[in-house]
Image: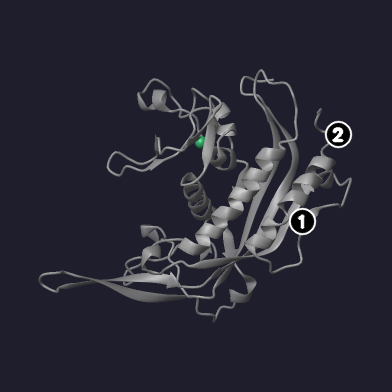
Amino acid sequence: MGQNGQRVFLGKVFFRGKIILRTGMHIGGSQESMQIGGVDSPIIRDSGNNLPYIPGSSLKGKLRSTLEKFGKRIKEGKEEKLSSNRSIGTFRQKVFIHCCEDIQLALNCEVCRIFGATGDDREFQKGKKDRRGDKAGNFPALLMVRDSLLDDAFMHPSRLLTEVKTETGVDRSTMAANPRQVERLLPDTAFIFEMVYSVENIILAGKAKTDFPEANLKTDLDNILTCMEIIESEGIGGHTSRGYGKVNFVFTEFLGRSLDYFKGKTKKEKGKSDGGFSIQEARGKIDEIVKFLKEESRNAVSG
Ligand SMILES: [Zn+2]
């Protein structure tokens, strides 16, 4: 076993469905994609087909920042709230997020276990290390969040997908207006989301026992769904405080599949896949998915 332990693959849990916009949404694109005569603030589009999409990084970032507000970790046997301890910004623009200092903490942290941690980089910041995370190692995320691509129903070339909205700030003493144009996706536009959670028995150095990670799996699936529920009340993308970005998540699949499924030894899977169900209905399936994966993994774990 390496210094950082090992990961035993046991299965996956799939979250799939539609993100349906209830109000206009703006996720900003690159300034380089701006054209002469274009709007001040365009949305992000796929550079290949020019269609709008929701980057996996935007959705993952929103999920992570939501969980950072209520998640917790166990440190030295004690439960604690999470602090925004890590600067990922630049000198000019400081951005602080939560990130655990080592893999032991990350494994016992509700945020870093799902979304990953890059380890302690204080040595890097002091110039003593060449690479970020060298000191404590990297804790790879258990959750993959894919780009959410436009739903097929919206692919027709004549379909209008965005509007340009003019937003105006008014100077409080002179009443001078400062109009700027913001491109936003129209309400009712739908995207297909897919997130895949990897069920792994993570064995840290010096800890030989292999268990099915029942408690962590239940907590993580529950936390992901809670974050989705909170995001429905807050929104995705820019300008949410001005009404942009309200979304609904509509599930089409919430499924657990064991290692044997991927090996082609079984077609058994557990969860729900009959389309059009809510976050709360998905939550009601957690216990049976966890029980199923534990049962299917009995040969892969030692006790
Ligand atoms: Zn953490």
Reading the image, the residue beneath label 1 is 271
Q: Quadrant of residue 219?
A: top right
Q: Quadrant of residue 147?
A: bottom right
Q: Quadrant of residue 108?
A: top right
Vertical relation: 258 (above or below) 43: above
Answer with left or right where residue 299 lies relative to residue 133.
right
Reading the image, the residue beneath label 2 is 299
Three-letter amino acid code of the residue under disc 1: Gly
Vertical relation: 120 (above or below) 83: above
Badge 1 marks a residue whose secondary structure is: strand
Q: Where does the image place residue 49, in percent across and percent down from the top left? A: 54, 66
Q: Where does the image place residue 80, in percent across and percent down from the top left? A: 49, 34
- The residue drawn where x is 53% and y is 35% is 73
- The residue drawn where x is 68% and y is 39% is 215
Three-letter amino acid code of the residue under disc 2: Asn
Q: Which of the pair 127/215 is nearer the observer?
A: 215
Answer with left or right where residue 249 lies relative to residue 52.
right
Q: How far apart, in angstroms, are the residues tagged by discs 1 and 2?
A: 21 Å
* Dot 1 and dot 2 residues touching (CB under 8 Å): no
In the picture, the quarter occupied by the N terminus is top right
**Mark 1 or mark 2: which comes first in sequence?**
1
Badge 2 marks a residue whose secondary structure is: loop
- The residue drawn where x is 40% and y is 69% is 243
Query: Does the rendering let one see residue 41?
Result: yes
Vertical relation: 228 (above or below) 139: below
